[in-house]
Image (cartoon, rainbow, N blue to C red):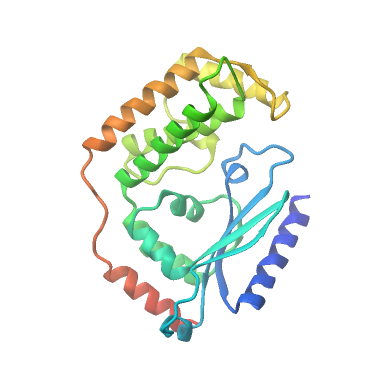
């Protein structure tokens, strides 16, 4: 089934290139499938980076910098223009770094590899930490305050907090998959409860409600508060210099 879907996605990418007159440099899976926590009926969240012909960047009227191609129960496909992508790299956009490190790649190019070699120099610990603890906080407030919860939402809060933990200890770009993030040293009681939660989730309907697990809930609540405080204390470490991004943008246009 995965190979059939990969072929279908490849056809969609080719269709986008023809219809939009762009070249797709990189396309990946994002979301739950990239994180390794998908359900059998999870949709496919395809994200791509594209470049237009050089003349399109010289127009008085700017073209849209996103392509939203398809959204249905199976496929969610959209992409960013390269110029938008480079601006997001400079801002330390954590979502973009996740795309760049997705374990499920539908298409890549030598051009993209050089772009990312430049882009990863702009990784910001503070920007990433703020993104991840904010995601966990939003999930906690929306889905994890009741007496019964969907265990999938535990994962959606734990994963970003574990990414914060990686950034705090390793000072680098965190892994994408939940399994890799779980390999960090965690309190033994928490690890046991997460294992128990994952076993129950695997045997349950996606929408099933289960009793709160106090150990996991407390960890989430405490870590959100801790990383909120830590993020405010961190200095802004974003790289202000745009010269490297300008250079790779011009080089990429020359390859077209």
Observer-nearest residue: 75 or 193? 75
Circle count: 0
Where, by quadrant of the figure, is residue 185 drawn?
top left
Q: Is residue 230 visible?
A: yes
Q: Is residue 84 left or right of residue 28?
A: left
Q: Among all residues in the image, which is located at the extreme front?
A: 61
Residue at the image point whose x is 33% and y is 60% from the top:
90
Residue at the image point whose x is 73% and y is 27% from the top:
205
Is residue 227 shown above or below 6? above
Q: Is residue 182 visible?
A: no
Q: Is residue 66 left or right of residue 75?
A: left
Is residue 114 shown above or below 181? below
Q: Which percent across, then down, holds residue 139? A: 50, 32
Q: Which percent across, then down, holds residue 154? A: 54, 27
Observer-nearest residue: 17 or 207? 207
Residue at the image point whose x is 48% and y is 56% from the top:
100
Q: Which percent across, then down, holds residue 175? A: 47, 43
Where, by quadrant of the figure, is residue 153 drawn?
top right
């Amino acid at each position: 089934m995965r190979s059939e879907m990969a072929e279908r996605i490849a056809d969609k990418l080719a269709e986008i290139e023809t219809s939009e007159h762009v070249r797709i440099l990189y396309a990946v899976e994002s979301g739950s499938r990239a994180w390794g926590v998908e359900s059998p009926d999870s949709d496919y969240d395809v994200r791509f980076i594209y470049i237009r012909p050089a003349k399109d960047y010289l127009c008085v009227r700017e073209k849209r910098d996103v392509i939203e191609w398809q959204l249905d129960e199976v496929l969610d496909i959209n992409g960013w223009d390269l110029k938008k992508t480079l601006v997001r790299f400079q801002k330390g956009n954590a979502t973009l770094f996740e795309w760049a490190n997705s374990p499920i790649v539908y298409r890549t190019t030598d051009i993209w590899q050089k772009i990312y070699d430049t882009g990863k120099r702009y990784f910001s610990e503070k920007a990433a930490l703020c993104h991840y603890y904010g995601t966990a906080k939003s999930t906690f407030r929306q889905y994890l305050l009741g007496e019964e919860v969907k265990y999938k939402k535990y994962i959606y809060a734990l994963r970003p907090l574990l990414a914060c933990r990686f950034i705090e200890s390793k000072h680098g770009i965190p892994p994408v998959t939940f399994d890799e993030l779980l390999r960090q040293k965690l309190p033994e009681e928490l690890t046991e409860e997460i294992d128990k939660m994952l076993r129950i989730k695997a045997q349950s309907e996606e929408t099933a409600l289960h009793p709160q697990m106090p150990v996991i809930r407390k960890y989430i609540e405490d870590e959100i508060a801790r990383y909120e405080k830590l993020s405010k204390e961190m200095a802004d470490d974003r790289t202000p210099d745009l010269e490297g991004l300008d250079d790779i943008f011009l080089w990429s246009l020359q390859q077209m």
